[in-house]
Image: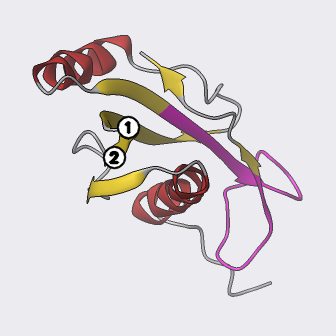
Amino acid sequence: MENRRELTEQELHNLAMNIVGKQLEADGFEFMAINSKPKKNPQYVCLKEKILHFIVVRNVVHPNDPRNYDEELMQKVKNHAVKFEAKTYFAGVGLSNASDQVLPVYLNEEYIVDYQGLIEI
C-alpha cells in the first residue's frame, strides 16, 4: 500500500478515452482521427453510416455528474462540426476509487466507471 500512485490527469483522460473508444468500436464507428490531448477537441473524429461524428471525451471527477458538460465549449465544437456536416457528441466518463469514492484513482487499483454513452449536442 505504501507505493500507491495517483493517476495523473493525462492517465485519467487516457482511461476515459479507452472506455469511450471501446464502446465506439463495438457500435461500429470507424476512427478517422484520434487526439488524446485533453484540451484539443474533438478527441475522436469517426465515420458511421457515411456520417462524420465529432466526439469530445472528458474524465469527470467524483462527485460531479458525467452528463454535465461545458455548453460554451460544446457549442464551439458543434459550430466547427457543422462546416463538415458532422454530428457532435459529448462523452463524459466518471472515474472514482472503488474502495472510497472520495479518494483519488490509484494505479493498479480498482475503480468505478460511470459512463452512460454519447450525448448528442
Instruction: Indicate left or right for 37 with 80 as reference.
Output: right
Horizontal and vertical percent for residue 27? 58, 48
Q: Name the residue at 76% across, 74% down.
A: 109
The magenta region covers 91-112
Within the image, what quadrant is residue 79 found in? top left
Residue 54 forms part of the magenta stretch: no
| Marker count (numbered) | 2
Q: Which residue is mark 2?
A: 46
Alpha carbon distance from label 1 to label 2: 8 Å
Q: Name the residue at 54% across, 53% down.
A: 16
Horizontal and vertical percent for residue 74? 32, 20
What's the residue type where badge 2 is placed? Answer: Cys
Instruction: Indicate left or right for 2 with 77 as reference.
Output: right
Q: Which residue is mark 1?
A: 55
Instruction: Indicate left or right for 112 with 95 as reference.
Output: right
Instruction: Indicate left or right for 106 with 21 as reference.
Output: right
- Give whichever of discs 1 and 2 has the lower sequence position: 2
Residue 97 forms part of the magenta stretch: yes
Question: How busy is the neighbourhood of tag 2: few (under 14 within 10 Å), some, or many (20 plus)?
Answer: many
Q: Nearer the viewer, residue 84 or 101?
A: 84
Within the image, what quadrant is residue 54 found in? top left
Under circle 2, the secondary element is strand
Above or below, 28 relative to 115: below
Horizontal and vertical percent for residue 7? 55, 67
Q: Nearer the viewer, residue 95 or 47?
A: 47
Q: Nearer the viewer, residue 55 or 47?
A: 47
